[in-house]
């Protein structure tokens, strides 16, 4: 920050005398493939190197210092994979030094190699080995979740320790005694996570898929994490539980979906009388509750004793349910026990159903939550497919309402899968290296590439050697040089090897199979092969290889067809894999369903929760009060990102962009309406004040109007910042103002200015009258 640096320079010179030299040693490194980089993550790397150098250049022009040293990196020579922004930032330092060559101040860019014991590489290895300090956390303040904080990527992260004695697991067991989190427990977790995030309103869960059961052994506990990763429509929703793979410890996904916070209309109340009439006389249990069909296979606790009555009609059913005594004290927005029975009581809708098999949830296509569950609810269940007991899967649509018919929750595409035996739940699906997420704050075995990095650290520049090299580099008088204790050609060769390992380190070779390898030929086959390689961890998949021969199972199949649904917009049941277990056959089914030849459909425009609000940081930034800044001319927020970095990542920073930049909406016609629409989105991320707002250039006028409207609503605005904002309307000029202006012009332009003024005035009059349809002669007669 130029002003802060100027103040710092003045303080130093006041205490110690004139500065003679400056060392620029700041830097940030953030490895990642180019396709995963975002504008914010690139800006994180650019800010200290590029913008920091620009500040120093402005603060210390040529001749203000004897020397300036810019600490660059030997990565400009070795070009490590995953560091394209870091390499570019350091090359800027080299270019800056070259541009100052021959000046009064000696400017030198030293491209340092790997250091021993200190520096960025040493810090990265320390984090990998578990030597880094833990991130701060705070209580979540909601049921089912213990703490909330942020992960290394800035995503909101909630944690919990689940034991077999936690009621939502203890009271949901198989007859064999296995304690499991119910599928509706994930819906409850989504609601509680959003409540802890400060967003307790209506929301929609999309494509919630169960990947592996979350089972807790007796006397043990599971470390559970819920991650909310910001997306355009809301958040990605990942639920992970602790897992091990060989000697590696980490977390593996148990469920995954998306949380959309888009505006959605609440449906009209249900006509419960008409539904009850179609379904006939309800079944009740005198003086007690009914046993749900799943009770044959599951040992439910008292909180699951919620089914009051039920009636089955033609392809639909209706049931009345109520919370068990004392369950209201659990405080859940969507009580998992009540939800579990409300979604699973109508198994008889499956034609030929017999309680000989356990049916388990595999996915929800959509869950719309309009309001929390009340103590008494009504569940209306309909078949969403030709559900038959002979099939592997069944699907339902479910509406949950209060006793008056007001809709609380809508569920579409609730898919369940038939298990041959309940023991399958006891054995977790095979875990692949691609699925295991390791925590950088915990000690982990180093990969071969990381082992090489650790070895290179031991061969790196020692601090004492670096100090000596610094003095010699300064004496050379060249604008740019590289200092390394290792052979640079050898290091460059190593980066190529590391790049290959990154691509292959999470996969294994194709096993020996009955059919020879056949390469994908069409675009659909190539896409499917990529899906299979990612999910199965196989380096090379042939189009005639069987999904099951490669280690596939039903939970991986759920994820596979979720990816197929998104890529080709077709929905197949996972049982289709028994008919078409190869890529060739699956691709043929997709082509038959979609008419897909060999070209991909144009991608859909992604949904966005906000039209105007654009977060300037990746993830959710920090816990401090948000700052909202209205963009200037043309309404684009891209030039605000650097300012967000100057303010720091511990404060959420939102840019407010104009309508019409995204989509085909027309721009606003007036500032009052614009401010009102901006406020509506601001209040979704900060429901109450005090607010901190600002505006750049013309955006300052809108920021002022936002402040006025918020205060009219009774809200406090703690800060309103106008950055380079012009007056919206200039005051009229009187005769004295005009004479002063003309006198200044005359002094600037000389004695011939009156003639120039008269000529320009006549030309202006002619042009202005032409614009109104008058001829010059006509104008003169008047």
Image (spheres, rainbow, N blue to C red):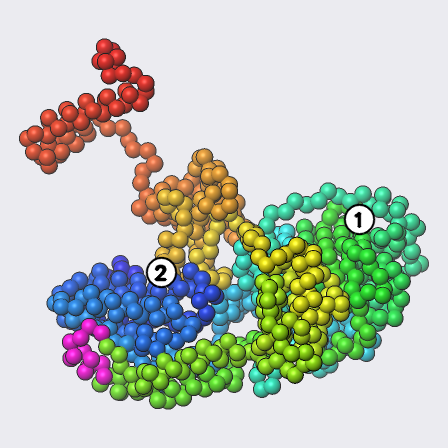
Residue 441 image position (x, y, % from top left): 50, 78
Q: Which quarter of the rendering shows the N terminus?
A: bottom left
Residue at the image position 28 percent from the left and 31 percent from the top: 731
Q: Earlier in the sequence, mark 1 or mark 2?
A: 1
> Which residue is denoted by mark 2 in the rendering?
646
Q: Is residue 681 left or right of residue 117?
A: right
Res 387 quadrant in image: bottom right
Res 26 quadrant in image: bottom left
Q: Residues within 10 Å of mark 1 (few under 14, many from 20)?
A: some
* Residue 403 tag number: 1
SS state under label 2: helix
Residue 7 image position (x, y, % from top left): 24, 62
* Residue 57 tag number: none
Residue 771 image position (x, y, % from top left): 31, 23
Residue at the image position 46 percent from the left and 38 percent from the top: 668
SS state under label 1: loop
Q: Which residues are magenta?
A: 469-480
Q: Is residue 545 visible?
A: yes
């Amino acid at each position: 920050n130029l002003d802060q640096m100027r103040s710092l320079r003045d303080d130093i010179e006041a205490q110690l005398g004139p500065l003679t030299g400056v060392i620029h040693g700041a830097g940030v490194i953030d490895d990642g493939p180019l396709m995963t980089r975002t504008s914010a993550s690139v800006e994180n790397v650019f800010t200290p190197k590029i913008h920091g150098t620009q500040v120093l250049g402005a603060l210390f022009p040529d001749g203000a210092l004897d020397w300036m040293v810019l600490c660059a990196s030997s990565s400009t020579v070795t070009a490590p994979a995953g560091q394209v922004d870091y390499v570019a930032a350091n090359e800027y330092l080299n270019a800056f030094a070259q541009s100052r060559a021959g000046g009064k101040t000696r400017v030198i860019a030293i491209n340092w190699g790997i250091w021993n014991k200190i520096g960025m590489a040493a810090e990265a290895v320390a984090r990998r080995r578990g030597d880094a300090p833990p991130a701060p956390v705070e209580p979540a303040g909601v049921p089912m979740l213990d703490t909330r904080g942020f992960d290394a990527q800035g995503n909101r992260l909630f944690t919990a320790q689940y034991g077999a004695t936690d009621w939502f697991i203890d009271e949901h067991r198989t007859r064999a005694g296995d304690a499991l989190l119910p599928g509706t427990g994930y819906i409850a977790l989504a609601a509680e996570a959003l409540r802890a995030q400060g967003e307790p309103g209506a929301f929609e869960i999309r494509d919630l898929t169960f990947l592996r059961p979350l089972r807790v052994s007796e006397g043990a506990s599971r470390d559970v994490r819920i991650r909310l990763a910001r997306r355009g429509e809301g958040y990605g929703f990942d639920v992970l539980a602790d897992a091990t793979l060989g000697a590696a410890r980490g977390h593996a996904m148990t469920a995954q979906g998306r949380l959309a916070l888009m505006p959605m209309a609440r449906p009209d109340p249900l006509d419960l009388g008409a539904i009850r009439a179609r379904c006939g006389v309800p079944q009740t249990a005198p003086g007690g509750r009914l046993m749900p069909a799943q009770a044959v296979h599951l040992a439910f606790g008292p909180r699951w004793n919620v089914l009051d009555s039920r009636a089955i009609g033609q392809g639909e059913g209706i049931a009345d349910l109520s919370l068990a005594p004392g369950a209201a004290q659990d405080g859940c927005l969507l009580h998992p026990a009540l939800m579990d029975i409300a979604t699973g009581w109508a198994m008889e809708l499956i034609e030929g159903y017999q309680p000989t098999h356990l049916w388990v949830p595999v996915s929800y296509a959509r869950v719309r939550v309009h309001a929390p569950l009340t103590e008494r609810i009504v569940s209306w269940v309909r078949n969403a497919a030709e559900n038959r007991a002979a099939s592997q899967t069944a699907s339902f649509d479910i509406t949950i309402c209060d006793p008056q018919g007001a809709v609380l929750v809508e569920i579409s595409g609730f898919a369940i899968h038939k298990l041959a035996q309940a023991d399958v739940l006891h054995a977790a699906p095979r875990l692949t290296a691609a699925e295991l997420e390791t925590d950088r704050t915990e000690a982990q075995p180093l990969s071969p590439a990381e082992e090489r990095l650790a070895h290179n650290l031991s061969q790196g520049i020692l601090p004492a050697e670096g100090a000596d090299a610094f003095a010699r580099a300064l004496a050379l008088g060249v604008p740019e040089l590289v200092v390394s204790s290792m052979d640079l050609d050898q290091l460059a060769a190593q980066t190529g090897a590391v790049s290959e390992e990154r691509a292959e380190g999470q996969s294994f070779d194709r096993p020996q199979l009955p059919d020879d390898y056949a390469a994908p030929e069409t675009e659909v086959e190539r896409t499917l092969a990529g899906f299979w390689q990612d999910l199965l961890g196989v380096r090379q998949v042939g189009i005639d290889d069987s999904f099951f021969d490669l280690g596939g199972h039903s939970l991986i199949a759920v994820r596979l067809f979720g990816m197929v649904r998104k890529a080709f917009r077709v929905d197949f049941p996972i049982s289709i894999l028994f008919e078409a277990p190869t890529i060739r056959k699956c691709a043929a089914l997709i082509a038959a369903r979609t008419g897909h030849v060999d070209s991909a459909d144009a991608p859909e425009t992604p949904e966005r929760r906000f039209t105007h609000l654009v977060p300037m940081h990746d993830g959710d930034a920090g816990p401090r009060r948000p700052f909202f800044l209205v963009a200037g001319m043309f309404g684009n927020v891209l030039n605000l990102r650097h300012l967000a970095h100057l303010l720091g990542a511990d404060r959420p920073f939102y840019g407010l962009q104009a309508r019409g930049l995204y989509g085909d909406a027309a721009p606003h016609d007036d500032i009052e309406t614009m401010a009102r629409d901006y406020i509506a989105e601001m209040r979704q991320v900060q429901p109450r004040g005090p607010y901190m707002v600002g505006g750049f250039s013309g955006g300052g006028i809108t920021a002022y109007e936002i402040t006025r409207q918020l205060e009219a609503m009774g809200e406090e605005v703690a800060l309103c910042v106008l950055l380079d904002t012009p007056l919206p309307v200039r005051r009229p000029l009187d005769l004295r103002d005009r004479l002063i202006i003309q006198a200044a012009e005359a002094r600037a332009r000389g004695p011939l200015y009156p003639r120039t003024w008269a000529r320009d005035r006549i030309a202006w009059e002619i042009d202005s009258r032409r614009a109104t349809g008058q001829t010059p002669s006509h104008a003169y007669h008047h």
